[in-house]
Amino acid sequence: MKKMTTAEKKAITQDWKEVMGTYEIYKPLHLLKRNGPLLTGIYLKPVYGEEHYVPVFHTHSLMTSFPVVSLVAPTSLLNSKGVEESISPLRHSNKFEALVECFRSQCPTAFLDTIACTTLDSIYQTTVAGRDNFPVQAMTDNILLLAWCEKSAMAHERIEHYKSILQGWPEGVTQRAGGAAGWEREVKTLMAPENLENSVAQELKKFKLSHFPDHSLVCD
């Protein structure tokens, strides 16, 4: 076996762009789409020493500063055993349509143009409930999503819920977020309307994505 070549990565990325429609190519093996104050993406994650890849749907909030496009609330294509479905270039060539349909059935949100607040809220809550890798960023992104959609009461209720979860985590983990109280202070500062608007504009500029069409977020 050998690593995917540059030409193979380019072809694989283009194939996924064509079936996903509204996404733009951000980098090889990475598609992005803007939905209002956040990005949704399809990361074709290299595995097995870059010999294969796994399609992963993810989100990235523009409402808070982050040095790279993050892979928050990831949903990977899974095989019949419930583990990540790794795809070789040969299998991609022979079974691409079937693999796309499997991904569509497992992660229909990835194929949406416009996305609703309730859909993303559910995704974030599921991510937090799973507690894989202590998902502080998903907590923050969830609160800021609710604030953007002017769901103030729900945002404050969720802050209290997430704060109680943070308080149950190891101290070494929560210290990175400033502790539960520090996280609460930070997120309440970030969720001020003027801060949300400014952050989105700055992050789009930083990642050179200002030209991306906005496929919109529905605040339902």
Image (tube, rainbow, N blue to C red):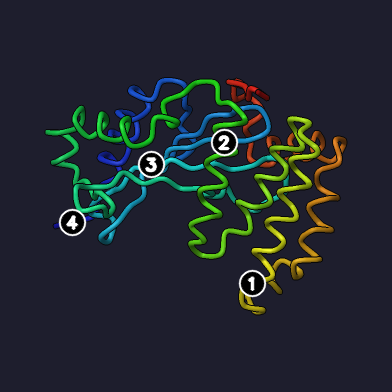
Task: Count neighbours of disc 1 (C-alpha within 10 A) and say few if under 14, some if 14 to 19, many if 20 or more.
Answer: few
The relative height of residue 118 versus residue 203 in the rendered view (above or below) is above
Q: Secondary structure at mark 4?
A: loop
Q: Secondary structure at mark 2?
A: helix
| x and y percentages locating residue 120 in the rendered image | 57, 36
Q: CA distance from mark 2 to mark 4?
A: 37 Å
- Find residue 161 and report its image quarter: bottom right
Q: CA distance from mark 1 to mark 2?
A: 25 Å
Q: Secondary structure at mark 1?
A: loop
| x and y percentages locating residue 28 in the rendered image | 40, 40
Q: Nearer the viewer, residue 46 or 41?
A: 41
Task: Count neighbours of disc 2 (C-alpha within 10 A) and say few if under 14, some if 14 to 19, many if 20 or more.
Answer: some
| x and y percentages locating residue 96 in the rendered image | 20, 32
Question: CB of mark 1 within 8 Å of CB of mark 2?
Answer: no
Which residue is denoted by mark 3 in the rendering?
29
Q: Nearer the viewer, residue 116 or 13?
A: 116
Which one is in front in this view, the residue at disc 4 or the one at disc 1? 1
Q: CA distance from mark 3 to mark 2?
A: 23 Å
Which residue is denoted by mark 2 in the rendering?
120
Q: CA distance from mark 3 to mark 4?
A: 17 Å
* Amino acid of disc 2: Leu
Which residue is denoted by mark 1 in the rendering?
168
Q: Secondary structure at mark 3?
A: loop
Q: Quadrant of the C terminus?
A: top right
Which of the marked residues, 3 or 2, is nearer the chain's N terminus? Answer: 3
